[in-house]
Amino acid sequence: MPTQKLRVGDVVQINPEHDEVFGGCFMTVTEPKSFGAQGFVKNAGEKGFAYYRCKHENMEYVGIATWSDRSDEDNEDDEGTEDGSD
């Protein structure tokens, strides 16, 4: 894991050797934590998301999410039109 501080919207990849089910998945950070981060992983072929907590040593930084699949219910602070404009 890089030394930069994680922020909401960052994308990390979970180490495949760490978790048999979620290893290799990309997680969008929803809450940076002192130990790592909490975020969501899109469930392939199913509706909804799996929320996951991961330590710094078990993930690698990928980048910043351009789009997020989370519903507006999960983004209560989001206001404006669907495209984010007012």
Image (tube, grey):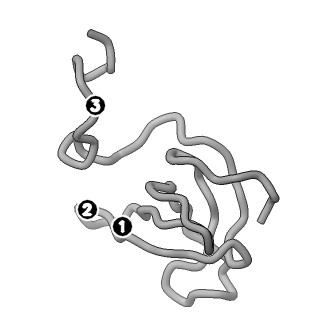
Q: Which quarter of the picture shows residue 51?
A: bottom left
- Tell me how far mark 1 sits from mark 3, CA to CA: 23 Å
**Position in image of residue 15 (x %, y %):** 68, 77
Q: Amino acid at mark 1?
A: Asn
Left or right relative to 14: residue 53: left
Which mark's residue is nearer the viewer, 1 or 3? 3
Residue at (33% x, 20% y) in the render: 84
Compare marks 1 and 2 and give the one earlier in the sequence. 1
In the rendered image, the quadrant that contains the N terminus is bottom right
Look at mark 3 in the image and give the residue it sits on: 78
Tell me the number on the disc at residue 48: 2
Who is closer to the viewer here, 43 or 37?
A: 37
Residue at (55% x, 68% y) in the render: 25
**Position in image of residue 86 (x %, y %):** 26, 9
Who is closer to the viewer here, 83 or 8?
A: 8
Residue at (45% x, 62% y) in the render: 39
Q: Amino acid at mark 3?
A: Asp
- Tell me how far mark 1 sits from mark 2, CA to CA: 6 Å
Tell me the number on the disc at residue 3: none
Relative height, residue 73 to residue 39 (above, below): above
Who is closer to the viewer here, 56 or 26?
A: 56
Left or right relative to 12: residue 39: left
Disc 3, SS? loop
Look at mark 1 in the image and give the residue it sits on: 43
